[in-house]
Amino acid sequence: MAEMNSFTRIQDAASANGNGKPANFGAIFQTFTFVKILTGVVTSVSVDYQGSLDGINWFALAAQDVGTVSNATFVVDKPCIFARAVVSNYSSTGTITVDVAPN
């Protein structure tokens, strides 16, 4: 089971559109912190933060993050066991890394 406030990498220097590696917390958590780290030149990117109870069916945890700067997104009252980040609309020479921690 994941420890609270322990970050798991779910996108590792992504340079294309696609689903990140899901984090399996091993238990239901309701509050999360996602940290998006951009390196190099990122001119356009969208990141969807998604959750799941079974690792198959996914739902939105937060509004789509379309910012082109590194930031943190906090999610409250969204119970799930799995979390992932989905990169889309990527048009850049830089990379996107996303970490998530249950709080």
Image (spheres, grey):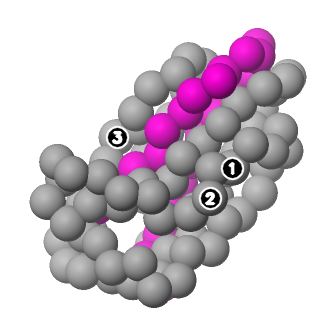
Q: Where residue 63 sits in the image (x, y, percent)?
A: 62, 58
Number of residues whose C-alpha sits closer than 10 Å to that of mark 2, classed few (under 14), some (14–19) or many (20 or more): few
| Residue at the spot of label 2 | 63
Q: Residue at x 71, y 63 (%)?
A: 72
Lateral position of residue 98 relative to residue 19, left or right: right
Q: Nearer the viewer, residue 9 or 17?
A: 17
The residue at the point 66 percent across, 21 percent down is: 90
Chain part drawn in magenta: 82-103
Which residue is the site of mark 3? 21
Magenta segment includes 33: no
Q: Return the residue at label 1.
A: 65
Type of amino acid at the residue the image marks with label 1: Asp
- Name the residue type under label 2: Ala
- Left or right: residue 25 versus residue 10 is left
Q: Is residue 67 left or right of residue 31?
A: right
Counting residues from the N terminus, which is met first, the one under dot 2 or under dot 3?
3
The relative height of residue 92 versus residue 101 in the rendered view (above or below) is above
Mark 3, secondary structure of its residue:
loop
Badge 2 marks a residue whose secondary structure is loop
